[in-house]
Image (cartoon, helix red, strand yellow):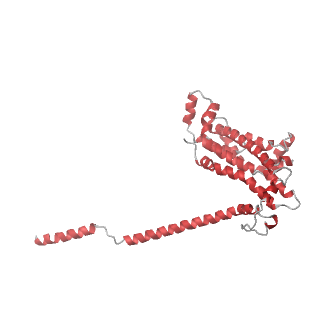
Amino acid sequence: MTTNLQTLPAADNKSAGAGKPTNRRKPRESRGTLAFSRAQRARSLMKHAILILAGGLMIYPLLWMVISSLRPNELIFREPGLWLNSLEMSNYTSGWSALTHPFGHYMINSAIVVIGSILGNLISCSMAAYAFARLQFTAKKLLFGIMLLTIMLPFHVVIVPQYILFSQIGWVNTFWPLIVPKLLATEAFFVFLMVQFIRGIPRELDEAARIDGAGHPRIFLRVILPLMVPALATTTIFTFIWTWNDFFGALIYLTDPDMFTVPVALRAFVDSQSATSWGSLFAMSIVSLLPVFLVFLFGQRFLIKGIATTGIK
């Protein structure tokens, strides 16, 4: 019995010691964690460096054009870098009045086409999207599929028959060929965007409005349309950018210099003099980019929200 009593405490001490956590692995684990954090930080720095380098490469042409618009005409291609030795603000004043009309005249022409295109896309595409998302009619899926197929149809395929049609009704050298097609929901991308947005809106809102006696026009105007603000804002921004930068359509239909939009005016700027004033051309290019930059700057949150959200409130 004495031997058993004497050995029991030792056994208890061993078992108690075995149950205590040891600190032998902590230095190794801390070293491993530190090495992992250093490797993760190095990867993060590498990713940021690559992104900064890629961003610099993409923005370099724009920076070069800004710097070139502030250089004398004879030094633009002699000093191709971004270092500015002399400031030449006369490029903006001479470029503004280098064509038949002041450059603001062509910006007003572009603004007219842009406003008409935006209104046309907002009205027609939203109505077509509501029809595809909420109404039931014959061959609905077939027509929706045909509408989606038009996204893959190049604009150059239909430009010849459209030109023949518009020339026969006397619309050449007017803004109507650039605006009227937008009133017919021809932009399938915006129709599809709005359809997906409306499908995310709960149908219980439609049913509640229908119980109150509202028909489809009232449901569309009072219930669906106020909830489509992000999608409408996205359509507005894309339409503005695409229409403002459209060169081919304006070049085809507008042959009178009084009707030129900004892209066509910039092209005519190159041919307006025997020796092209590149500084003035770059200066007016910067001026023409300012509206696009401002619209994207103030509307980017609506653009991201309109693409990312599903319309559920």
Q: Nearer the viewer, residue 298 or 193?
A: 298
* Residue 201 appears anywhere in the view: yes
Percent x, y of residue 164: 85, 44
- Looking at the image, the residue that sits furthest to the top is 213
Residue at figure coordinates x 74%, y 56% from the top left: 286
Percent x, y of residue 42: 53, 69
- Looking at the image, the residue that sits furthest to the left is 1
Residue at figure coordinates x 61%, y 33% from the top left: 222
Number of numbered labels in the structure image: 0
In the image: residue 274, left or right of residue 146: right
Residue 270 vertical position relative to residue 121 in the rendered view, above or below:
below
Percent x, y of residue 228: 62, 41
Residue at figure coordinates x 70%, y 51% from the top left: 292
In the image: residue 166, left or right of residue 30: right
User: Image quadrant for the N terminus?
Assistant: bottom left
Q: Nearer the viewer, residue 281 or 198?
A: 281
Residue 167 vertical position relative to residue 268 in the rendered view, above or below:
above
Q: Nearer the viewer, residue 264 or 131?
A: 264
In the image: residue 43, left or right of residue 297: left
* Residue 152 appears anywhere in the view: no
Q: Nearer the viewer, residue 155 or 280?
A: 280
Percent x, y of residue 64: 73, 63
User: Image quadrant for the C terminus?
Assistant: top right
